[in-house]
Image (cartoon, grey):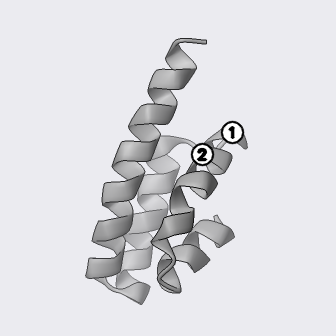
Amino acid sequence: MITLSALVACGHPDYLPMHLRAARRNGLSNDEIKELLMHLAIYVGVPEVNYAFQIAKEVLADYDEEEATR
Protein backbone atom coordinates (compact mmCIF):
# COMPACT_ATOMS: atom_id res chain seq x y z
CA MET A 1 0.00 0.00 0.00
CA ILE A 2 2.86 2.34 0.80
CA THR A 3 4.53 1.65 -2.53
CA LEU A 4 1.32 2.28 -4.46
CA SER A 5 0.79 5.52 -2.52
CA ALA A 6 4.34 6.68 -3.18
CA LEU A 7 4.14 5.93 -6.90
CA VAL A 8 0.94 7.94 -7.28
CA ALA A 9 2.14 10.79 -5.05
CA CYS A 10 5.51 11.08 -6.79
CA GLY A 11 4.06 10.89 -10.28
CA HIS A 12 5.46 7.54 -11.42
CA PRO A 13 2.45 5.86 -13.06
CA ASP A 14 4.65 3.73 -15.33
CA TYR A 15 5.50 1.53 -12.34
CA LEU A 16 1.90 1.11 -11.16
CA PRO A 17 0.97 -1.97 -13.22
CA MET A 18 3.75 -4.10 -11.76
CA HIS A 19 2.99 -3.01 -8.21
CA LEU A 20 -0.78 -3.34 -8.62
CA ARG A 21 -0.31 -6.96 -9.67
CA ALA A 22 2.07 -7.52 -6.76
CA ALA A 23 -0.46 -6.03 -4.36
CA ARG A 24 -3.14 -8.44 -5.60
CA ARG A 25 -0.74 -11.40 -5.32
CA ASN A 26 0.00 -10.33 -1.74
CA GLY A 27 -3.67 -10.37 -0.78
CA LEU A 28 -4.95 -6.84 -1.38
CA SER A 29 -8.45 -6.85 -2.86
CA ASN A 30 -9.62 -4.67 -5.74
CA ASP A 31 -11.84 -2.78 -3.30
CA GLU A 32 -8.92 -2.09 -0.96
CA ILE A 33 -6.88 -0.73 -3.86
CA LYS A 34 -9.79 1.48 -4.94
CA GLU A 35 -10.21 2.78 -1.38
CA LEU A 36 -6.50 3.55 -1.20
CA LEU A 37 -6.69 5.55 -4.42
CA MET A 38 -9.78 7.45 -3.26
CA HIS A 39 -7.99 8.32 -0.01
CA LEU A 40 -4.97 9.58 -1.95
CA ALA A 41 -7.09 12.02 -3.97
CA ILE A 42 -7.31 14.31 -0.96
CA TYR A 43 -3.56 14.43 -0.49
CA VAL A 44 -2.05 14.22 -3.97
CA GLY A 45 -4.81 15.62 -6.14
CA VAL A 46 -7.65 14.35 -8.25
CA PRO A 47 -5.87 14.44 -11.65
CA GLU A 48 -3.07 12.15 -10.48
CA VAL A 49 -5.50 9.74 -8.85
CA ASN A 50 -7.83 9.72 -11.86
CA TYR A 51 -4.92 8.62 -14.02
CA ALA A 52 -3.99 5.95 -11.45
CA PHE A 53 -7.61 4.76 -11.49
CA GLN A 54 -7.49 4.39 -15.28
CA ILE A 55 -4.36 2.28 -15.00
CA ALA A 56 -5.72 0.26 -12.08
CA LYS A 57 -9.02 -0.46 -13.84
CA GLU A 58 -7.21 -1.98 -16.81
CA VAL A 59 -4.55 -3.83 -14.82
CA LEU A 60 -6.95 -5.26 -12.24
CA ALA A 61 -9.40 -6.43 -14.91
CA ASP A 62 -6.56 -8.21 -16.71
CA TYR A 63 -5.32 -9.70 -13.43
CA ASP A 64 -8.78 -10.98 -12.50
CA GLU A 65 -9.21 -12.49 -15.96
CA GLU A 66 -5.85 -14.25 -15.71
CA GLU A 67 -6.73 -15.58 -12.25
CA ALA A 68 -10.09 -16.86 -13.47
CA THR A 69 -8.41 -18.99 -16.14
CA ARG A 70 -5.99 -20.64 -13.69
Q: Position of residue 61 (x, y in %)?
A: 39, 35
Q: Residue at x 36, y 45 (%)?
A: 58
Q: Residues within 10 Å of mark 1 (few under 14, many from 20)?
A: few
Q: Position of residue 16 (x, y in %)?
A: 53, 62
In the current view of this chain or complex, which residue is farthest to the top? 69
14 displayed left or right of 44? right
Amino acid beneath label 2: Arg
Disc on res. 21:
2
Q: Position of residue 57 (x, y in %)?
A: 35, 47
Amino acid beneath label 1: Arg
Q: Residues within 10 Å of mark 2 (few under 14, many from 20)?
A: some
Q: Is residue 23 above or below residue 13?
A: above
Disc on res. 3:
none
Q: Residue at x 26, y 79 (%)?
A: 47
According to the image, label 1 marks what residue? 25
42 displayed left or right of 66? left
Q: Is residue 4 above or below residue 56?
A: below
Cα distance between the residues tagged 1 and 2: 6 Å
- Of helix, strand and loop, which one carries label 2? helix
Q: Which of 62 and 36 lies nearest the eye of the viewer?
A: 62
- Of helix, strand and loop, which one carries label 1? helix
Q: Residue at x 44, y 59 (%)?
A: 35
